Amino acid sequence: MFCAMRLHEFQTLARNVTGWLPDWCATLILLALSGVVATAAFRILIRILTRITANRDLFWRSLVVRGAAPLRLVILIVAFGFTVAIAPLTELEADILARLLTVGAIACIGWITYSALYIWTTIHMRRFRLDAEDNLMARKHITQSRILMRVAKILIVLVAIASMLMTFDAVRQYGVSLLASAGAAGIVAGLALQPVLKNLFAGIQLAITQPIRIDDAVIVEGEWGNVEEITSTYVVIRVWDWRRLIIPISYFIEKPFQNWTRENASLIGNVMLYLDHTTPVGRIRQEGDRIVRASPLWDGNVYNLAVTDFRERVMEVRVLMSARNAPRAFDLRCEVREKLIDFIQREMPECLPRTREDLRAEWAPMPAPQMERGHKDG
């Protein structure tokens, strides 16, 4: 009651001041004055908030900075809403402006909500580093945060748009009738949105179960690479030669793939050697141990050299060694392979694969040929 009385007093004051002007001119003047007042109020408020949060956490300081623009719009919308209530407008004009201001207010609320969520997510992810040696925990949190952030963004947009549409009676009635009918239109819409909804729910499932994470080393469609980006609909794989492989996010829920860093980043690499059967395996094992221990790429956990197979012409020697992550494991494999081959060529070249052929044949003396009878008789 008190607010209504005060509003009536402001309406009377506005009519007394602008009564000699046309209604449209008076409305424009009142809107301009309210805009000036709202801008001044915003500047005062933002200074106060800046001083209050100067010694607070980074989240609050960032929220004031990023929320300045939507806060300005909110104050302008409130000021314009008050102006529309006291301006000399018809009922239809006032209703249209009020609806537009309501839509703007809903958009600002969604904007502020998204900004607060974005700031919190960014500050949370700053606690983790992907370039660390053991980045399993960082990959878990960053992957989950990014996926959930994108899903939350979609939900905020959908809720904001739905709230805007529901402010109009015609749209509200249409939506109620559409939900009540639940006929062929709903089925067609569901079929049309099936790929989008499929990837959206797959993204939520991916964030919860985490079969892949940011910077995971994976093999997908025969290509080895690292997970570079996870969006709400697709995953970007950075292949070893810098190509980018774009995979629908539902692929990682429905199809098998290799994840080399699912639980931790450490990997065991192998080097296969094919040598002659006469090779002294002990010397090769000692040299391999020396090479691995001297390498800064080895993590000190696993080293093994064993003969894993005998074939017709060669024997198969497998060397195993571990490293902290996939790139270091690959480099370590190359280093061990090169140095072992160099050692074999330099110290025991006869142990390289050879082809043997036995050229000996059994020999027996042939009988002496008989002389012709005529010659013998003579």
Image: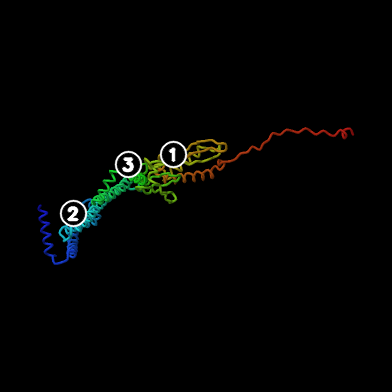
Q: Which residue carries the number 2 mark?
A: 52
- Closer to the chain start, of discs 2 and 3, is 2
Residue 177 locus on image (x, y percent): 27, 46
Residue 90 locus on image (x, y percent): 18, 59
Q: Which residue carries the number 3 mark?
A: 208
Rendering quarter of residue 184: top left
| Residue 341 seen from this side | yes
Q: Is label 3 or label 1 in front?
A: 3
Q: Which residue carries the number 1 mark?
A: 303
Q: What is the spatial separation of the Cα atoms under label 2 and label 3, in whole angstroms?
A: 37 Å
Query: Along the line of sight, which residue is nearer the eye, 374 or 277?
Result: 374
Amino acid beneath label 1: Tyr
Element type at mark 1? strand
Element type at mark 2? helix
Q: Which class describes the residues within 10 Å of circle 2: few (<14), some (14-19), or many (20+)?
A: few
Q: Is residue 78 left or right of residue 222?
A: left
Residue 115 locus on image (x, y percent): 26, 52
Amino acid beneath label 3: Ile
